[in-house]
């Protein structure tokens, strides 16, 4: 481990050894506890990014750490060639608490969406014929980095340089009912939607849009897929974000927060849809391993405790009020949008500069679209910590704006 190197040495060696795929901030984090993380120079930060909605219970949550420790000492990996008890347990837990009747576990969000698209195509082909393979997704969406999921991602910047892309994908704008209506037809195998767009700037789908997508999928025998990789697993103050709307998909994908920071992805579906997959149709070597499954069960144990989500929603309201007050004080036109602990505020082109200065002042926040703050604090953040974050933002805004 290189934990004893200075930050500058880590950066310099990292630039030599690692592929140049990220514009990292010039810090290296080596410890975390609750809402706090520490860098190699022992500087402490309030973490309102949580590794992009992954460490939702905060860092090193004792119940998650204990589950991982215990399982690591028993058995880390076998294979899906054999039954995995923890996999059955996590599947049952997710099924009990959702529309779904079947689960498939993999290693990431992109992989879950890739598998969901394969499932939708197989289902459509098997039940309706080879003409039915098209996928309608949304502009400004984000679904992953594999060739099919980056194609489903409705942002040209992710497409360029990777053409030719898989065929059969088209895009409509979020909440544009007319565009959706004209895009879905008898060739549509699936409509793929994030109930709240994350990477695209924290834009929620309206209930009407989700309802319309459900109606159109019913009318044309297409599958409705909700990508809850970011907005799912408690992030919005319900276990799954679509539960706010009452609209139920046929397939839902999960990842990020599900195993408290271990690699995981999940495809959840109805039994009818899942029946399209037979042995050999899809698979994974490490997906669904005993260690990630144990972590997943621990995460759900904590989130499903009585009163957990009530607390999240109360503190979310407190954070929203504080952010809206700040926006007003500094003449920011927009209001906070999103739900629970997935919040966005568009502040304009100075957002990246403010983000960097917040970091220097001890608060990690994230910026998307070059102009929007995306706040993804741990669900366990308390009002004192929210006050601290707001104070750091106030101080930083007053310096920059
Ligand atoms: C992060 C994300 C993905 C991709 O997940 P990875 O684990 O990075 O592959 C897919 N969809 C949404 C909505 C995401 O936020």
Image (cartoon, rainbow, N blue to C red):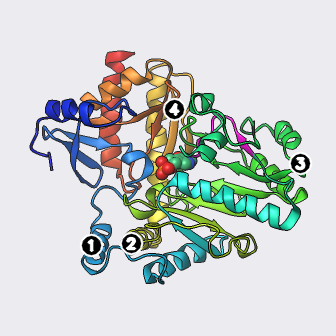
Question: Which range of residues does the magenta coloring cover?
Answer: 136-143
User: Label 1 neighbourhood size at 10 Å, few (<14), some (14-19), many (20+)?
Assistant: some
Label 4: element kind:
strand
Name which of mark 4 and mark 3 comes first in the sequence: 3
User: Label 2 neighbourhood size at 10 Å, few (<14), some (14-19), many (20+)?
Assistant: many
Q: Is mark 1 within 8 Å of ligand 1?
A: no
Q: Which residue is mark 2?
A: 298
Q: Quadrant of residue 39?
A: top left
| Cα gap from disc 1 to disc 4, whole angstroms | 36 Å
**Numbered disc in front, either 2 or 4:** 2
Which secondary structure dominates the residues rendered in magenta? loop
Q: Give percent across and percent down for residue 364.
A: 33, 37
**Numbered disc in front, either 2 or 3:** 3
> Is residue 140 rendered magenta in the image?
yes
Q: Which residue is mark 3?
A: 185
**Label for residue 345?**
4
Label 2: element kind:
helix
Q: Which residue is mark 1?
A: 66
Please say if the residues under marks 2 and 4 sit with CB atoms less than 8 Å apart: no
Callout count: 4
């Amino acid at each position: 481990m290189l934990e004893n190197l200075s930050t500058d040495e880590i950066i310099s060696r990292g630039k030599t050894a690692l592929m140049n795929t990220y514009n990292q901030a010039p810090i290296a984090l080596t410890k975390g506890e609750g809402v706090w993380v520490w860098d190699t120079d022992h500087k402490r930060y309030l973490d309102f990014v949580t590794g992009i909605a992954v460490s939702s219970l905060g860092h090193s949550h004792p119940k998650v750490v204990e589950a991982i420790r215990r399982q690591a000492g028993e058995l880390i990996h076998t294979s899906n060639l054999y039954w995995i008890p923890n996999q059955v347990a996590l599947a049952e837990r997710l099924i009990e608490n959702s529309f779904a009747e079947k689960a498939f576990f993999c290693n990431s969000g992109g992989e879950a969406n890739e598998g969901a698209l394969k499932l939708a195509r197989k289902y459509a082909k098997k039940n309706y014929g080879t003409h039915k393979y098209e996928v309608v997704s949304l502009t400004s969406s984000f679904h992953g980095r594999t060739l099919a999921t980056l194609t489903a991602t409705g942002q040209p910047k992710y497409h360029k340089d990777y053409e030719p892309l898989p065929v059969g994908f088209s895009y409509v704008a979020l909440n544009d009912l007319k565009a959706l209506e004209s895009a879905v037809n008898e060739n549509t195998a699936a409509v793929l939607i994030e109930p709240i767009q994350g990477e695209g700037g924290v834009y929620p789908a309206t209930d009407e849009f989700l309802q319309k997508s459900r109606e159109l999928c019913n009318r044309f025998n297409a599958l409705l897929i909700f990508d809850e990789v970011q907005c799912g697993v408690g992030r919005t103050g319900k276990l799954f974000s679509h539960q706010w709307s009452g609209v139920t998909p046929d397939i839902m994908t999960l990842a990020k927060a599900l195993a408290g920071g271990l690699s995981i992805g999940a495809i959840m579906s109805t039994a009818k849809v899942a029946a399209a997959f037979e042995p050999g149709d899809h698979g994974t070597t490490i997906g669904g391993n005993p260690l990630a499954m144990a972590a997943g069960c621990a995460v759900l144990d904590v989130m499903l405790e009585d009163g957990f989500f009530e607390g999240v929603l109360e503190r979310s309201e407190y954070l929203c009020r504080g952010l809206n007050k700040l926006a007003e004080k500094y003449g920011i036109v927009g209001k906070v949008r999103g739900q629970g602990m997935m919040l966005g505020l568009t502040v304009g082109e100075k957002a990246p500069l403010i983000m960097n200065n917040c970091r220097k002042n001890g608060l990690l926040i994230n910026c998307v679209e070059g102009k929007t703050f995306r706040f993804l604090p741990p669900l366990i953040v308390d009002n004192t910590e929210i006050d601290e974050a707001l104070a750091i933002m106030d101080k930083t805004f007053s310096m920059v704006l």
